Image (cartoon, rainbow, N blue to C red):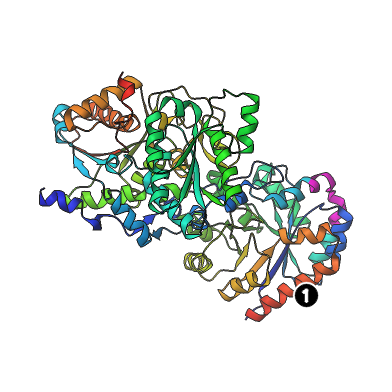
Amino acid sequence: MPMKNLIPYFTLGYPNNETLKRFLMAMPLDIINYIEFGFPSNDPRYDGPTIRKTHRIGNENYNENFYFDIFKHFSDNNIKMYSLSYYSDIDDIERFAAILSNLGFSGSIIPDLLIDYYDEAFDVIETLNDMHFEYIPFFTPSTPDNVIKKVSEKTFSWIYYGLQPSTGIDIPYDLDYTCSRIFSLVKSREINFGFGIKTIDDVSELARRGASGVAIGSYLVNMLDKNDVNGFIDYLKMIRGALDVEA
Amino acid sequence: MSEEFKSLLSNDIIPENWYNVTPDLPEPLPPPRDTKTDFSSINLLNKILPKEVLKQEFTFKRYEKIPDEIMEKYLQIGRPTPLIRAKNLEKYLDYNGKIFFKYEGATATGSHKINTAIAQAYYAMEESANGVTTETGAGQWGSATALAASLYNLKSQIFMVRISYEQKPLRKVVMSLYNSNVVPSPSNLTEFGRKILKENPEHPGTLGIGISEAVEYALDHNYRYMVASVMNSALTHQSVIGQESIRQMELLGEFPDVLFGCVGGGSNFGGFAFPFLPKSDDIEIYATTAHEVPKFSKGEYKYDLMDTAGVLPAVRMYSLGADFVPPKIYAGGLRYHGAAPSLSLLINHGRIKSDEVSESEVKDAIKIFANTQGFIIAPESGHAVASAIKYIKNHRNDKKTLLINVSGHGLLDLSIFQ
């Protein structure tokens, strides 16, 4: 079986450019599969308080030029990069995708597109498809069945399934039902889960039920805050281990 | 009692499951959003709502089994409620089609509110909460909460808006009969209430203040906060209304062409109308509000606060603004500034139509209904009947089958006719 995906998430500019660079460059490339970068937004409406904080501070610090070499580092090492971008921040979708492509990004997760801009969503998806830029469908438990089916049919990349209404919070849910629902609606597709995943148990439970991988963001913030690079690496290795057991 | 009437009221009319509309919506339901930078009001729900209610709030499960312990209480408080053909009303209106109404006024507390109160109190009891708490305006929701708590031997603490507490003493008596502790809000029971009273000892209170007090009380006393409407879980519990109606209509060999319901926060309406959505794409559905609270025609479809105090998360809904001060209209249950997100989405999408009626139309409708069918209905429900009467006047020869949700009786609201 292929290796299950570990997808760490970072908001650019948080806690500051230098610290983030240190974390990113220390990350062993053989234990991660993709990397997700949040471009700081003034209105990260579908993020929880922890990630909202990273956007606020990231906004103050973010310097595009600072990250060119870092993006190149991941791109050169075949780690696919995805942006987490809010559609409310995008003025021109073609220009947006072209710029990210030039920076080495493979695609984007746009969490507000299906929720707040549903009428425009399918045109946006078509534009990105034409540009061979991966639109990552972002579904949550609130996404209706017909929308999941329709969007899945129009897209070709992996799917991001958010387990919670926003990141870093902990609303109870039935994991068996959650997994069986999404797997029955979307067959033979890579589905990576995110939102509220932190422990080895969380990861094992998901992997056991057939998840293709996990995205982890909020839980890394504490390590960034403490400048705990070693703890961060150990944590990622533990998660990698949990994913490998189930692969 | 006729055989037909008995079969319409047999125990098996009550559905085995609640119906959740989320997976059947035409577009994704915008999730609740935090409004504060470093604080999650969504996470706050985790601390004040029973876990199972919270789970149902965010679930995409189309059907959720109604636990036996809740089913037993539904039977006890008068479910299934009657579905009756309004033959005299048809005759009075000289209508060539058929009119049916579902009568939620037949429950123990006289309105639909008890359907979700029982469910929420049960889940609070299941996780060993010390009691339940909520706010109430006119007192319908408070009465339902008080009874539901009493049925499960739970304590209940109700914060009743001070002005209503003083003006509607009978509702207070109803709650007290069910052993509830009812206090005027703002109260001395909470820090928030004490702060307001210090600033203005004569403060008349608002629902927003009541919510803040109830939330604080829940956090401090291991109580669970009871949600009256707007939130998805409440609409899901109310789906017993629509599902019973479908079965009762089927037993009569009928299916409605047009549905009418009134909208305050949207729970009676959603519970009544949503179960029909997967059954037919053609059914016409009207959500009626008061002229004085024109949320669908003058409101904006946007993220707004559920409560004026901003304790609960913001949701995307039709709203007149959380600071909208409604006039003291004859139908207190329809004064709410917004409407449930799922209902708002369906209105915005065009699947459900909205209507508004005036106070005189509502009072006329209540009188007509009382004199033709005998039931004195709640002023809120009078909006649905008024809307149906208006519809009939414009579609006299269509021979359509109409179904109206009468969400409650009006026996404690007679002062509107004085």
- Judge from the rendering whether residue A38 lies leftward or rightward of residue B349; answer left or right: right
User: Vertically, is A44 above or below A224?
Assistant: above
Q: Which residue does the numbered mark 1 point to in the structure image?
A: A30
> For the point 29% across and 52% down, which residue is it?
B76
Numbered disc 1: what chain? Answer: A
Tell me, yes or no, whether the highlighted magenta stretch contains residue B143.
Answer: no
Snapshot quadrant of residue A189: bottom right
Residue B103 image offset from top left, x and y in percent: 26, 41
Specify the segment rendered in magenta: A57-69
Disc 1 element = loop
Q: Residue at x 85, y 48 (%)?
A: A63
Most distant residue in the right direction? A18
Dominant SS of magenta comes to helix
Instruction: Bin the neighbour count of mark 1 within 10 Å (Cα to Cα): few under 14, some 14-19, many 20 and up.
Output: few
Q: Is residue A65 magenta?
A: yes
Instruction: Determine the image quadrant of residue B392.
Output: top left
Please say whether residue A56 is visible from this viewpoint: yes
The residue lying at 61 percent from left, 64 percent from top is A193
Camera-side residue: A215 or B155?
A: B155
**Figure quadrant of residue B259:** top left
Q: How many marks?
A: 1
In this rendering, position of residue B14 left or right of residue B211: left
Q: Residue at x 26, y 46 (%)?
A: B81
Q: Is residue B280 visible?
A: no
**Above-or-below relation of B383 to B21:** above
- Coordinates of residue B106 in the picture (x, y in percent): 27, 42
Q: Amino acid at mark 1?
A: Asp
Describe residue A183's horizontal placement relative to residue B268 as left or right: right
**Residue B374, how many percent across, how many down?**
18, 32
Left or right for A197, reference A183: right
Residue B382: image x %, image y %?
30, 30
Q: Nearer the viewer, residue B15 or B344?
A: B15
